[in-house]
């Protein structure tokens, strides 16, 4: 079982809709959770990070963390065609190494 | 504002050849990483360095070696390239291992024929 799981998609939503991206992780000791966006042929770039249970909002983006369910999600409100990209969930391992492990990513397509 | 710089950007190798991918960061970060990205596989951690002088294996270390030359530089070496190592390689750095934002280089597209 992969340590960080994401649905590969593509997730297709119309412009202006809410896009919901999900991620589950296997290590109960994980403490830090990140969402990266990657455009085709480009490097990943950080969208949001979250450390505590609950919601964290930044503009059109909301990250949600539920450690009991080992689940982290990213909501994108008022989706724009420019949001079309692959979204990567990353989690640090709960052992003493704290290395950063990525999921395989979800491709999001926002239709004009 | 260079950030994380990787060289080269593109490389074609023949099976059995060796090469070193270079990575340097100018953000005074303690931790550095090497990932490979294959279609549908996301980013897989090859090796990482929590701080200057330390290196550790990640998820897929076989066939690779690394050197943390100093705080700025972290190189990845392929001793005998194989077609299975055809991939896009990303170097990244962060202030604290696994706990703070990782900044990525522009990637190296490697093809082994």
Image (spheres, coloured by chain):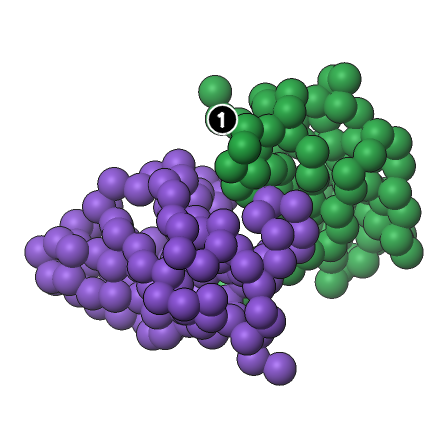
Give residue A28's position: percent from left, percent from top: 65, 21
Q: Are there few (<14), some (14-19), or many (20+) residues within 10 Å of tag 1?
A: few
Give residue A43's position: percent from left, percent from top: 54, 62
Identify the hue of chain A.
green
Q: In front: A63, or B77?
A: B77
> Residue at horizontal 13%, vertical 54%?
B80
Residue at the extreme bottom of the image, as rendered: B1
> Residue at horizontal 65%, vertical 30%?
A30
Is B109 placed above or below A92 here?
A: below
Residue position marked by numbered label 1 in the rendering: A2
Identify the hue of chain B.
purple
Subunit of label 1? A
Q: How many marks?
A: 1
Give residue A105's position: percent from left, percent from top: 58, 42
> Residue at horizontal 55%, vertical 59%?
B30
Give residue A56's position: percent from left, percent from top: 88, 43
Q: Is residue A14 left or right of residue B110?
A: right
SS at circle 1: loop
Q: Is residue A16 left or right of residue B101?
A: right
Is B99 placed above or below B28 here?
A: above
Is B107 placed above or below A62 here?
A: below
């Amino acid at each position: 079982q992969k340590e960080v799981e994401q649905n590969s998609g593509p997730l297709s939503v119309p412009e202006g809709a809410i896009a919901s991206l999900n991620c589950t992780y296997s290590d109960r000791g994980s403490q830090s959770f990140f969402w990266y966006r990657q455009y085709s042929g480009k490097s990943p770039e950080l969208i949001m990070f979250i450390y505590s249970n609950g919601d964290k909002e930044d503009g059109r983006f909301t990250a949600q963390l539920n450690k009991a369910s080992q689940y982290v999600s990213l909501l994108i409100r008022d989706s724009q065609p420019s949001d079309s990209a692959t979204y990567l969930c990353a989690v640090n391992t709960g052992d003493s190494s704290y290395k950063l492990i990525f999921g395989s990513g979800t491709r999001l397509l926002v239709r004009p | 504002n260079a950030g994380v710089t990787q060289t080269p950007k593109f490389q074609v190798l023949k099976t059995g050849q060796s090469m070193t991918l270079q990575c340097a960061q100018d953000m005074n970060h303690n931790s550095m990483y090497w990932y490979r990205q294959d279609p549908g596989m996301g980013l897989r951690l090859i090796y990482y360095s929590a701080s200057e002088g330390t290196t550790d294996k990640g998820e897929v270390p076989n066939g690779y070696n690394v050197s943390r030359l100093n705080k700025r530089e972290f190189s990845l070496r392929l001793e005998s390239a194989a077609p299975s190592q055809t991939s896009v390689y990303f170097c990244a750095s962060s202030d604290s291992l696994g706990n703070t934002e990782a900044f990525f280089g522009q990637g190296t597209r490697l093809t082994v024929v």
